[in-house]
Amino acid sequence: MDEQALSCGPGTGELTLDGSVPVVEITGLWTKYGRTVVHQDLNLEIEQGEILSIVGGSGTGKTTLLRQMLGLERPARGCVRVFGEDISVIDSDQLQQLRNHWGMLFQQGALYSALTVFENIAQPMRELHVLPEDLVQDAVLLKMNMVGLGPEHANKMPSDLSGGMVKRVALARALALEPKLLFLDEPTAGLDPDLSEAFVALIKSLHRELGLTVVMVTHDLDTLFALSTRIAVLAEKHVIALGPLRDLLKVDHPFIKEFFLGDRGRRALEALDDKTKTEQ
């Protein structure tokens, strides 16, 4: 195998945002650390408007795959296209243009500890000068309202916030530039069940209202089952199964049976079924 990253061929130089191509398209991807192969000939397409969740056991490279979609890591070989552009070959200006169309919610929120809630959310707008300063305040308050935070929280510091509020501020910042694509890394990690359920409901509402495409890595089965349009299962260095939850339950593979139909999986499925019946 050629150790150099192989691109998908020249792009158009313009982002394709109309849904005519997959939002994310991964082809023939290999990831290596020394002699350790994490991904081997991995393929995955993410369609506009879906919530695609990535699951797998420890060491299957879930977060690594997310970082490759974000352009933070390069694969040893293969192609990662986002909005039709191969992110491994575009220049820094093109990559920044691409990043303006996605938002990222990190597992721990990754708020700037020395900045207020308002300043954290305003930071992407100010950095890229997308709005005159007199309109930034209105835009920040709008994003805060979208995630269920009142203006009274604007001047609080991250250290003054609960875990649930940190997640909401981080989500507001991820939405600051009105992205079309949202990446979520363990979005409900560290939240108690009630806060987790409320945050899942918020993501579901924003996905519907804003028409977002969402890519999520999570090990929380309740979150996974409640949100996912499709689920990609990583094992044996590639995607071994891809589809809606109910389809994956029929796949005869040891990891899938243990993950989805073990004790935790059965409890989460029962909770999902109970919730579905209640909503009908």
Image (cartoon, rainbow, N blue to C red):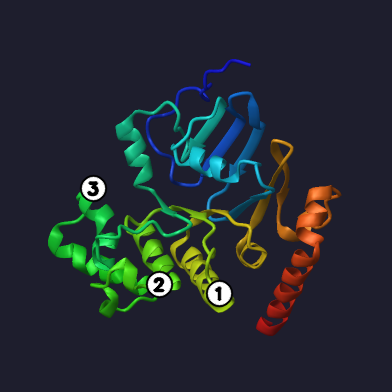
Measure the C-alpha gap from mark 2 to mark 1.
Answer: 13 Å
- Identify which residue is drawn at 66% across, 42% down: 60
Disc 1 crowd, CA 10 A, few/some/many (<14, 14-19, 20+):
few
Q: Amino acid at mark 1?
A: Asp
- Where residue 155 sits, quadrant-wise, is bottom left
Residue at 51% across, 44% down: 23
Position above or below: 167 against 259: below
Dot 2 or dot 3: first in sequence order is: 3
Expressed as whole percent of the image width and height from the top left, the position of residue 10 reads 45, 23
Query: Which of the two discs, 2 and 3, sits closer to the camera?
Result: 2
At 17% from the left and 64% from the top, the residue drawn is 135
Instruction: Single out the residue that lies furthest toward the front.
Output: 159
Measure the alpha-carbon separation of dots 2 and 3. Answer: 25 Å
Quadrant of the rendering where the N terminus is positioned:
top right
Q: Which residue is mark 3?
A: 128
Judged left or right of residue 119, residue 107 is right
Q: Earlier in the sequence, mark 1 or mark 3?
A: 3
Q: Quadrant of the C terminus?
A: bottom right
156 vs 201, nearest the viewer:
156
The residue at which mark 1 appears reads as 192
C-alpha gap between disc 1 and disc 3 = 35 Å
Instruction: Report the residue that reaches farthest toward the top.
Output: 2
Q: Earlier in the sequence, mark 2 or mark 1?
A: 2
The type of residue carrying mark 2 is: Met
Which residue in the protein does label 2 denote? 165
